[in-house]
Image (tube, coloured by chain):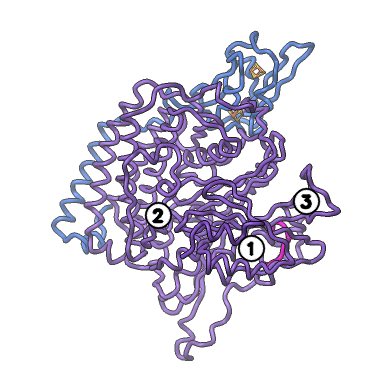
């Protein structure tokens, strides 16, 4: 049995312990990286890879080009039993053609991350990783390097590759049934643009691939040129169905970085806002599955729930979708008088409507028949780095609100719904139950809303909280919240300036999208849309 | 309309017809009774407005904080000359009114979604007072 202590002792010399559940391990590329990762996964139980990202140190003040390597690759690993997060930092020098070993065979989730690092930083993980994922083909140079300047596209590189290999193991008489086609790039439920390539035999799917990158706005690079407060409206555009929870995730990440404690009322209202966002995101997801199945009343109901939640947001902060509701150190607005009462009454209406959706769908034979597809088992889900309701539908009990509670999630009473089979139906069941639990959380929080103000000027900190001058000291950190789609994490590296040196956004949909690419095999074509909607992949979060 | 084959399959013909009729009448009646959808209410955040240009201290904080760079302030010998807002770029985020310490810049509920010509997208907030 591995205990935190045995792990800490093993790496005692090299490990920087950040706090109870976070540690950092720094490696050089000449060490046996693959061996260390293998040991971490198999002996110390780091079975989930949260994210991998690159870091270019060129413009850091402390960087010494003579003795240090210019690039860093950071792996964030999670041990789900001990709730321990390990940040493994590997220093690389690209000029010396150092190639890092790929960890695809240890964690399947690594594949897209490695491709992204190669296209953005030019750090190679072997030939498999050297394919573009998000940016256009023919882009010269590596855009996330600090010395990148855009000088046109290379037309000669812009070649159409065939997406699927030719099938050889199909019997000859079936060969004329094999065909391939693409759906998209318009998502049927307007969750952004993505393209689904399918190779079919009759109506069974042989291979599938999800092509992403149509909505790539390079938010992470944009963040490097913006003030910390100016990034809040940018995070609205990640998962645009639950903008409030993204804002809160960003502000929490910045506050964690500089250790600011916000007022109790702001904490409570942040919980309310993010749970409201969860309600609207989940109903939107259920509505889109219902649309794919072809049932109409649930769509109407889900639209009306979304409408109610949007008007609550509008009364609260003046905007229905892109709320920009939180600020560093508090919230953007005070609660308008009467809002709390209104909210409590509308919660009853929402809960009635949710019950109605439930009676329409949960026991309907058509619904069950159509949704019993695309099963994902728990092992694969963890291997692919899926978080949030999609992971819980496979039966894995992992919710950041429970395992490392932030704000008052410790004090409110709520349960984590779990699925069994991990198919679309379970994902639907988990979502509908999570809506109920969210409503329960909101009513508990609003019943005992702390007194005080939300945008307090005097917080216990030595930093200047004025949005124009706010500049954390030299530090870096990773902080996460549970958003409707799963774990939304922000890695911020600060150089003491009023703009972040590097921001990395870990969007939960990125990993769902990667998993979805391989999930469709052996299902039917008319189930493809249902599965896509049930995974709730939002392109804004995948492409960033 | 709502009469969809799959619906019949799922709940049986009689219930489906009853349901369709109910939805049909409810939609018609509610369409007649309910007021039309109001897109902008008095709670909405809209374009910023300069309520009192004399008290503006020309500190240009709003210009610096704006994430879309849609404000441009020009001054002539410490006097505010023009206060141009690019309406097509403003995202109504409210950061400019947050940083304005004399509180002369606030958000209105006015959200223009169309214009007659290209030039009208740039308005001078001083003249609108
Ligand atoms: S509301 Fe936002 S986008 Fe519009 S002018 Fe103010 S800061 Fe700029
Ligand atoms: S922040 Fe306020 S006082 Fe300063 S220039 Fe803008 S409108 Fe004037």
Q: Which residue is mark 2?
A: A389
Q: Which residues are magenta?
A: A119-125
Question: In the rendered structure, the residue with mark 2 lies on which chain?
Answer: A
Label 3 element class:
loop
Return the residue found at the far bottom: A172
Q: Which residue is mark 1?
A: A114
Q: Which residue is mark 3?
A: A148
Pick whichever of labels 3 and 1 is earlier in the sequence: 1
Question: In the rendered structure, the residue with mark 3 lies on which chain?
Answer: A
Q: Residue at x 64, y 9 (%)?
A: B55
The tint of chain B in the picture is: blue
Q: Nearer the viewer, mark 3 or mark 1?
A: 1
Q: Is residue A149 visible?
A: no
The tint of chain A in the picture is: purple
Q: Is residue A500 magenta?
A: no
Q: Is residue A121 magenta?
A: yes
Q: Quadrant of residue A467?
A: top right
State yes or no: discs 3 and 1 in contact (Cβ < 8 Å). Answer: no
């Amino acid at each position: 049995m591995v205990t935190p202590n045995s792990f800490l002792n093993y790496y005692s010399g090299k490990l920087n312990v950040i706090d109870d559940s976070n540690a950092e391990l720094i490696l050089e590329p000449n060490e046996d990286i693959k061996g260390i990762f293998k040991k971490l996964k198999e002996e110390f139980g780091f079975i989930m890879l949260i994210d991998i990202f690159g870091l270019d140190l060129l413009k850091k003040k402390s960087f010494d080009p003579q003795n240090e390597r210019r690039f860093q690759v950071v792996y964030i690993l999670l041990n789900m039993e001990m709730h321990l997060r390990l940040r493994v930092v590997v220093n690389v020098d690209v000029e010396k053609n150092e190639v890092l070993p790929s960890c695809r065979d240890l964690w399947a989730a690594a594949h897209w991350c490695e491709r992204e690092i190669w296209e953005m930083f030019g750090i190679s993980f072997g030939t498999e990783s050297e394919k573009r994922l998000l940016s256009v083909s023919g882009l010269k140079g590596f855009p996330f390097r600090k010395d990148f300047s855009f000088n046109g596209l290379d037309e000669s590189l812009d070649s159409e590759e065939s997406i699927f290999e030719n099938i050889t193991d199909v019997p000859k008489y079936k060969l004329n049934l094999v065909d391939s086609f693409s759906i998209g790039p318009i998502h049927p439920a307007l969750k952004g643009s993505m393209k689904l390539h399918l190779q079919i035999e009759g109506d069974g799917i042989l291979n599938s691939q999800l092509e992403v990158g149509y909505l790539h706005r390079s938010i992470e690079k944009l963040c490097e040129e913006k003030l910390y407060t100016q990034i809040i409206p940018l995070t609205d555009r990640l998962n645009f169905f639950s903008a409030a929870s993204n804002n809160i995730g960003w502000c929490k990440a910045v506050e964690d970085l500089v250790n600011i404690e916000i007022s109790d009322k702001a904490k409570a209202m942040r919980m309310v806002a993010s749970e409201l966002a969860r309600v609207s995101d989940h109903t939107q997801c259920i509505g889109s599955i219902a649309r794919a199945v072809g049932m109409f009343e649930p769509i109407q109901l889900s639209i009306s729930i979304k409408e109610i939640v949007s008007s609550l947001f509008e009364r609260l902060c003046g905007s229905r979708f892109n709320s920009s509701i939180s600020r560093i150190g508090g919230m953007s607005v005070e609660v308008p008088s009467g809002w709390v009462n209104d909210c409590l009454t509308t919660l009853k209406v929402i809960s009635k409507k949710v019950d109605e959706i439930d009676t329409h769908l949960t026991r309907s034979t058509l619904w069950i028949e159509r949704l019993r597809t695309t099963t994902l088992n728990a092992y694969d889900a963890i291997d692919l780095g899926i978080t949030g309701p999609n992971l819980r539908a496979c039966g894995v009990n992992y919710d950041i609100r429970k395992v490392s509670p932030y704000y008052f999630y410790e004090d409110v009473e709520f349960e984590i719904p779990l699925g069994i089979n991990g198919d679309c139906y379970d994902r639907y069941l988990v979502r509908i139950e999570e809506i109920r639990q969210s409503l329960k959380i909101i009513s508990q929080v609003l019943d005992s809303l702390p007194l005080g103000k939300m945008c307090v000027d005097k917080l216990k900190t030595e930093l200047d909280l004025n949005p124009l001058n706010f500049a954390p000291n030299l530090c870096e950190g990773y902080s996460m919240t549970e958003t409707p789609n799963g774990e939304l994490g922000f890695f911020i590296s600060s150089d003491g300036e009023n703009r972040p040196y590097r921001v990395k956004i870990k969007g939960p949909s990125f990993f769902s999208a990667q998993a979805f690419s391989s999930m469709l095999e052996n299902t039917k074509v008319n189930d493809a849309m249902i599965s896509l909607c049930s995974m709730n992949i939002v392109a804004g979060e995948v492409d960033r | 309309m709502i009469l969809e084959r799959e619906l019949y399959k799922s709940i049986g013909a009689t219930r489906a017809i009853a349901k369709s009729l109910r939805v049909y009448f409810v939609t018609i009646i509610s369409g007649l009774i309910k007021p039309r959808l109001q897109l902008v209410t008095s709670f909405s955040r809209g374009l910023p407005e300069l309520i009192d240009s004399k008290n503006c201290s020309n500190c240009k904080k709003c210009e610096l904080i704006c994430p879309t760079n849609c404000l441009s302030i020009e001054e002539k010998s410490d006097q505010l000359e023009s206060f141009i807002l690019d309406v097509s770029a403003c995202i109504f985020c409210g950061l400019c009114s947050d940083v304005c310490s004399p509180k002369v810049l606030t958000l209105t509920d006015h959200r223009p979604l169309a214009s007659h010509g290209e030039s009208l997208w740039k308005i001078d907030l001083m003249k609108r007072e």
